[in-house]
Image: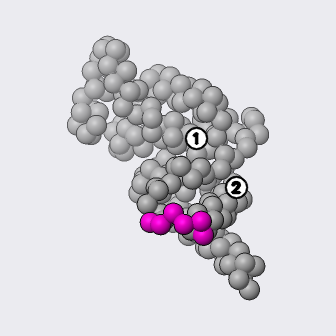
Amino acid sequence: MKREEELRIIELIRNGDQELYKVIVEEYSPRVLSVIRGVIPCREDAEEVAQDVFVKAFFSLNKFRGDSSLSTWLFRIAYNMSISKTRLKKVNFVPVDSAQISSNYCSDNSEEEAYIREKRFELLNRMLSSLDTSERFLIALFYNHEKSIKEIADITGTKESNVKVKLHRIKKRMGEMVDEKMEVSYG
């Protein structure tokens, strides 16, 4: 949805056409749920938080200034509510499913390549599970949702420089983990 359209719909909702809110929910609920699932892997819990996000957003719509995109504002609410939920309840990390990653990764489906691909998925899952909730959230926003550093800073309420540093440290730590694994496997 384009920014002008978002602002027009929001203004109409503010002026009493509350039925239009379902347009926002239908447009953004898959992405909001996906962001929440980056923090809360249990689908039922994530769906509950997503519903709460849209209820809170509806009642806070008068606070939306339009300084950022509507998706950034919704992601910020989702982030805050997800973090609050994880503080209340211990959340277990859901590993990456190989079906989620493009099948174009290996062009040949030989047994050796299938074995290597499976080992890489296992390593990726171990690496991701070693990250804390906020780090997994940053990775999901940056890579899965292709949010800019500025948008991530807006969503998380941190400075852009802090987002850059955190992403750099996460990537560096993951790179070190890969190097360690390679040394163990081939050293």
Q: Are marks 2 and 1 in contact (CB under 8 Å)?
A: no
Q: Height in image: 177 above or below 129?
A: below
Q: Which comes sooner in the sequence, label 2 or label 1?
A: 1
State which quarter of the image contains the N terminus: top left
Kind of residue sitting beneath label 2? Ser
Residue 39 as seen in the image, left or right of residue 187: left
**Label drawn at residue 129:** 2
**Label drawn at residue 82:** none
Q: Residue furthest bottom?
A: 187
Q: Residue at x 27, y 33 (%)?
A: 7
Q: Height in image: 65 above or below 144?
A: above
Kind of residue sitting beneath label 1? Arg
**Label 1 residue SS:** helix
State which quarter of the image contains the C terminus: bottom right
Q: Magenta stretch: dominant SS?
A: loop
Q: Whole-percent x and y of residue 5? A: 24, 33
**Label drawn at residue 37:** 1
Task: Give the camera-side residue of 57 and 107.
Answer: 107
**Label 2 residue SS:** helix
The residue range painted magenta reads: 107-112
